Amino acid sequence: MIDLSTEAARRRSGVLRADVTDDDALRSLDARMLWSALIEPGDGVAGALIAAYGPRAALEIAVGARELPSVRSDDIREGRRRWMARVDEATTAVARARAAGVMPLTPEDESWPRRLDDLGVHAPVCLWWRGSAEVLRLPRSVALVGARASTAYGEHVTAELAAGLAGRGAVVVSGAAYGIDAVGHRNALLAEGPTVAWLAGGVDRPYPAGNRHLIERIVGEGGAVVAEVPCGASPTKWRFLARNRLIAASSVATVVVEAGWRSGSLNTAGHAAQLGRPLGAVPGPVTSAASAGCHRLLREYGAQCVTGVDDVLELMGSLDDSRASDAREVAAVSSTDPADRLIAALNATAPRGVAELSQRTGLRADEVSAALGLLALEGRVAEGPKGWRRASR
């Protein structure tokens, strides 16, 4: 069981944030740090509980130290089963962060990127960062995203956009992946501008490993590397999808430079659209499959055509703050398909039960069962006497 005493909060939080001395602020920071390890990104039940009771009281409800509220009690009971399965992870998160020199950031801090608040109950409860937290709240930031399997054309356009935007004082935001992401970060640094990399796993384990040097450069050259999951967390498939909402939400505008028909970058674009953020796409050769997703955004989703830096600056200036605020209620992780989470969590040889899958994916047990039923009908999973496994195709 998690020790929720003030002294325990001081031991856990104080070692990372000596600047927090007020007991109430310390307990709030401590609770948010623990919450970040207990839940999967975008957990709306936890988000609503924290919004209603505050992080400390919500944590006491979650671990059974405070009476369960009657409102949404069934959801909270189901949440407890998921959250309590991760208590051991929560109690070791601070030690991992301390060893890696990683700091927590919460909505109570001045450096908190306020645009994330537009995610409502699906906003992060805590961020973990390396580098400069100040860059996170700079007003002019733009997401440059695109395919990992990028072409020479896509990389050339990305390099020009990133360097040009950085030279004009904009922060380039992306996900540190191979391809378009890496080119954007690298050329922002070459232009001596700050850049922000959002990771799907813990910031103490740079991913992909081949971009470790780039990630360290971002940290050392005035940028920031950030995650909502604590140190030690692995970058699973659904966490990449959930991470995409943070790239979109933290940016004034999102530009997809190059993307295939089913590229993960379209997921980021979808979050930007849900949030009411301006969305741009770079056209490519009509014969290039690597640009099919961008053409789809231009044709079907009202993305603005981007051919140069001036187009992006115009896009960034078109943000209507009231429209973004009105979009808070519709911004959700609903585009993160439960089926994708389950397929990623299943193994082709080692069967897993509903309870274990619920813990691994952050889904409720009834959501797991319902999704497994649909996947079984599609022939993508199979049930045996010891549980479910991924079907061989």
Image (cartoon, helix red, strand yellow):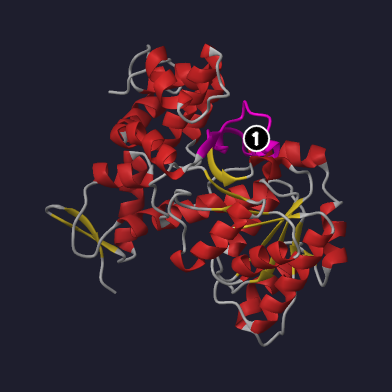
Does residue 335 appear in the picture of this structure?
A: no
Q: Residue 182 placed where, x, y %?
A: 60, 67
Residue 249 higher or lower than 256, as above or below = above
Is 381 on the left or on the right of 161, as rendered? left
Residue 133 higher or lower than 68, as above or below = below
Q: Residue 77 placed where, x, y %?
A: 34, 26
Instruction: Specify the segment rendered in magenta.
Output: 103-126
* Rendered image quadrant of residue 217: bottom right
Q: Residue 372 placed where, x, y %?
A: 31, 53
Q: Which residue is mark 1?
A: 112
Number of other residues with Cα within 10 Å of mark 1, as a class: few under 14, some 14 to 19, many 20 or more: some
Residue 160 among those drawn in magenta: no
Is 372 or 32 nearer to us in this picture?
Answer: 32
Is 377 or 173 nearer to us in this picture?
Answer: 173
Does residue 237 appear in the picture of this structure?
A: yes
Is 53 on the left or on the right of 368, as rendered? right
Residue 114 among those drawn in magenta: yes
Q: Residue shown at 82%/61% (left/top)?
A: 167
* Rendered image quadrant of residue 165: bottom right
**Marker count (numbered):** 1
Q: Residue shown at 71%/66% (left/top)?
A: 190
Q: Residue shown at 46%/20% (left/top)?
A: 58
Secondary structure under the numbered disc 1 in the rendered image? loop
Q: Amino acid at mark 1?
A: Trp
Residue 377 higher or lower than 151, as above or below = above
Q: Residue furthest bottom?
A: 287
Q: Quadrant of the N terminus?
A: top left
Is 45 on the left or on the right of 312, as rendered? left
Q: Quadrant of the C terminus?
A: bottom left
Q: Residue 227 placed where, x, y %?
A: 52, 46
Q: Residue shown at 76%/64% (left/top)?
A: 191
Is 11 or 386 nearer to us in this picture?
Answer: 11
